[in-house]
Amino acid sequence: MTPHAPTAFGTVHRAVRANVLFLTIDNPPVNAGSHAVRRGLVAALQDAPSGLHGAVLIGSGRSFVAGSDLREFSAPLVYPELPDVIAAIEAAPFPVIAAIHGVALGGGLELALGCDHRIATPEAKLGLPEVSLGMVPGAGGTQRLPRLVGREIALEMVCGSTRISAKRALEIGLVDAVTTDDLLDAALHYLDQGAGKRRAAQLTIPQDDPQVLATLSAKIMKKGCNRPNMAEAIRLVMASNLPDVTATLADERASFQQLRLAEDASALRHLFFAERRAASVDWLSATPRPVTAVGVVGGGTMGQGIARACLAAGLTVILVERDAVSLVRALDSLRHALQARCDRGRIDAATLASQLAALTGTTELADLQDTDLVIEAVFEETSVKQPLLAQLDALLPPEVVIGTNTSYLDIDALVADLPGRSRVLGLHFFSPADVMRLLEVVRAKATNDVTLVTGLALAKTLGKQPVVARVAEGFIGNRIYSAYRRRAELLVLDGTDPQDIDAAVTRFGFAMGPFAVADLSGLDIAWAMRKRQAATRDPRARYVPIPDTLCEAGRLGRKTSAGWYDYPEGAALPSPATQEIIESARHDAGISPVAADPATIQRQLLIAMVNEAGLLLAEGVAQRASDIDVVLTNGYGFPRWIGGPLWWAAQQDACALHQDQTALARAIGPGFTPADITAALRDLARSA
Ligand code: NAI
């Protein structure tokens, strides 16, 4: 049904039919709740004719309201603010129904909560993501939601920034009806059935158990890394049972206003926009090739993870292994993992059945003829990858895109002799590939535009965060991580204990320090790389022999129950054997050990990353400074609330950064290449 005689109030259209006011928000592409939308809503409500039976608030296009317009959040907000809009809805003498399709998120859901009733289409998604953006909901989300669904569910939704389905929203009482009918007709019908005024802010909060809430709050704080906005979100939801709702709403607003301008929210907004930018390549107009069938060559750790990611996204997968035994092992392991997901309730039985049906295996590359894209994840050796890529290029129809998951090998060299090299790109997944969001999409010299945009489109299909990189040893992420790890190892050689470095790093906000990470992933991977690089290493550069000695002693990390740490009963303990190896290396290098304090450790590790980031930008390996922050926060555990290494650097005093860079140059010695950090920061400011 379409209402007649619309009147435009900027981005809000108003129409009256059968004594019902229809307000349609029309702010493409996602109906962000901008100032113009707020002003339009207030004007349309204030201008409403008398004697109305009710009103329906709906969004045009693909969504109700995807959230407030974050671009407004770094400056003072202009009247009318969202609480003013909600006040106008609550003051209206007729009931207002929010008719929700697409998404109602953040300010969009708060707007719906300010209405008297909510109906939704089955595919609609609802949520309050403000906490993931360093803030708290600021227009009644922490006060109205608990009154409808109880404080326990509200805590989970607000603090977890979870999006829930319309079905779940109906179960918990967040929406009043879910309809498969035309949404406007359904809203009208709902009004006709006698829906009256029902302000969520006036409802009595459902009974709850204080003990359950206390346990949940403690769990949330721990999971939320004790961030100040998490504490505020918990405090505000807990206070929603207080009788004076005007006071608790004002309290929430004040908290929101203060948090949205604080460091965490600024950094997280930076990442919000940086992630969207990273997924796009402005100068490309090519159309991606549709991908529904994927071939995965190599069924080891990565191949299986990539296959799981593709299956979860509804793609069909043909897995290729080098022999029948390896194939059976890989398929068994994959099927077992899918079954385990079903047993844990992560997917339902029907999804399990369709994923199992979408998975097949072969030992013949020729069976990949009907795929749209093939990803190789075989051993990281040129002697294995190069002939394989040549075989794929010879066998596959010319339109099939070929991706390589190499971590370090030179893709340009791998494909140099291939006639079809323009359809090859790097698709560098992170382990576990079905869990980690980051995907480095590597544009080799010969990669053509269609291949590149197909890689970016695949990332979107898989729900990954793509970042475009050029070919370089370690691309963006591993190269920065290598510089960071190298600095950490030099700090150890110069006198700081590994456990003190790990402690300083976790205090900064990483989940794990570099030595705990090395033990987890296995020291032998980097060992093999160092051996490969031995011939080309700058002989003047300082070398830390400690990890080699650890490997030679069989201390390969957790898998041998000994690495940088000892693991007598699973938990990491400082190791006397490692300490001995460290002291011997210091002695051999003639070093009088001096331990660095936690602040120096943190700054030295950060400046190592920042310097490498500057080099990557200057070399054109990374397109933009903000892409580097996206890589580090999505793939390497860099704390999101600090925004990434370059955002961190942009907040520092320029002279102090210069001093840090000088100290870094001194510590690394010959072979150190200083980067122009100022240029990197200028680029960050430009793209912001
Ligand atoms: P893996 O050793 O677990 O698996 C490699 C698999 O490839 C084995 O199952 C092997 O049987 C199979 N294979 C070898 N040659 C083959 C051929 N010609 N045809 C078909 N299958 C063949 O290795 P992993 O860890 O899965 O690594 C694979 C690739 O992914 C490497 O290039 C690695 O650098 C890269 N990578 C690894 C990451 C990790 O964390 N393990 C992270 C990101 C990338």
Image (cartoon, helix red, strand yellow):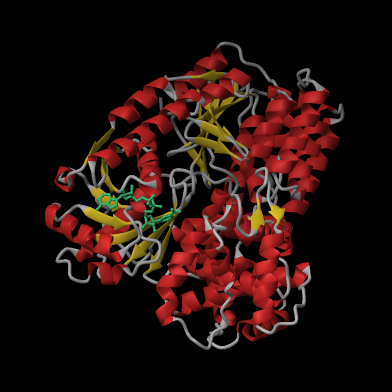
Percent x, y of residue 414: 26, 67
431 lies left or right of 322: right
109 lies left or right of 290: right
Q: Residue at x 83, y 33 (%)?
A: 239
* 328 or 19: nearer the viewer: 328
219 lies left or right of 178: right
Residue 688 seen in the current view = no
114 versus 34 height, above or below: above
- Quarter of the image with the N terminus in it: top left
- Quarter of the image with the C terminus in it: bottom right
Percent x, y of residue 333: 38, 35
Report which quarter residue 473 is drawn in: bottom left
* 479 or 202: nearer the viewer: 479
Residue 431 seen in the current view = yes
Q: How many marks?
A: 0
* 510 or 159: nearer the viewer: 510
Q: Residue at x 43, y 38 (%)?
A: 62
Percent x, y of residue 354: 32, 27
Percent x, y of residue 267: 64, 59
Q: Residue at x 41, y 47 (%)?
A: 301
